């Protein structure tokens, strides 16, 4: 019985010493709002058009960059990708994609904002078409 008690105490001390001390800051994940200005939801473009990707992301804390990509809806096909590492609490996103696809497609403009260096993100997308 005494050996079991000693083993239990030893195991408790080992487990407790291996745990990281968690502070309130460890649980804090910044938040951001993303407003996609262009393309408008449901917009129609023609092949060869320039598609403006414009958005604004705002946070109460410093953001750590963003990704823009245009992909086929419900597919992994990506037609455009850009990564920008920008530190600010407000980020203005401006990019242009030449709709040089060969066939009409339902597409999505996707914005991913990096909230911190631990890779927490906020995402927003808008659907549009190229005919």
Image (cartoon, rainbow, N blue to C red):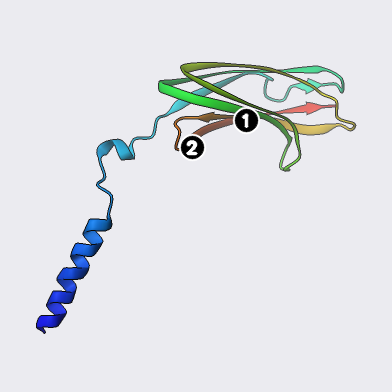
Residue 30's spot in the image, x, y percent?
40, 30
Q: Is residue 74 above or below residue 9?
A: above
Identify the residue at the far right of this view. Answer: 102
Q: Choose top left, top right, bottom left or bottom right for residue 41.
A: top right
Q: Which residue is mark 2?
A: 119
Which is closer to the viewer, label 1 or label 2? 2
Residue 62's spot in the image, x, y percent?
42, 22
Residue 117's spot in the image, x, y percent?
45, 33
Asked which secondary structure carries label 2, the reply is loop
Between discs 1 and 2, the one toward the N terminus: 2
Q: Which mark is residue 50?
A: none
Label 1 to label 2: alpha-carbon separation: 18 Å
Q: Image check: 32 left or right of 12? A: right
- Residue occupying the point 18% across, 75% down: 7
Q: Image check: 16 left or right of 96? A: left
Q: Which mark is residue 125?
A: 1
Q: Residues within 10 Å of mark 2 (few under 14, many from 20)?
A: few
- Residue occupying the point 29% across, 35% down: 25
Q: Residues within 10 Å of mark 1 (few under 14, many from 20)?
A: some
């Amino acid at each position: 019985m005494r050996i079991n008690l000693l083993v239990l105490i030893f195991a408790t001390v080992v487990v407790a010493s291996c745990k990281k001390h968690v502070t309130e800051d460890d649980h804090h994940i910044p938040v951001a709002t993303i407003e996609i200005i262009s393309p408008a939801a449901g917009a129609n473009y023609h092949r060869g058009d320039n598609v403006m990707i414009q958005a604004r992301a705002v946070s109460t804390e410093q953001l750590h960059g963003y990704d823009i990509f245009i992909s086929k809806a419900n597919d992994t096909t990506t037609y455009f990708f850009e990564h920008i590492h920008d530190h600010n609490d407000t980020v203005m996103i401006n990019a242009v994609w030449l709709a040089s696809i060969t066939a009409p497609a339902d597409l999505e403009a996707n914005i991913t904002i990096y909230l911190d260096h631990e890779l927490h993100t906020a995402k927003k997308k808008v659907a549009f078409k190229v005919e």
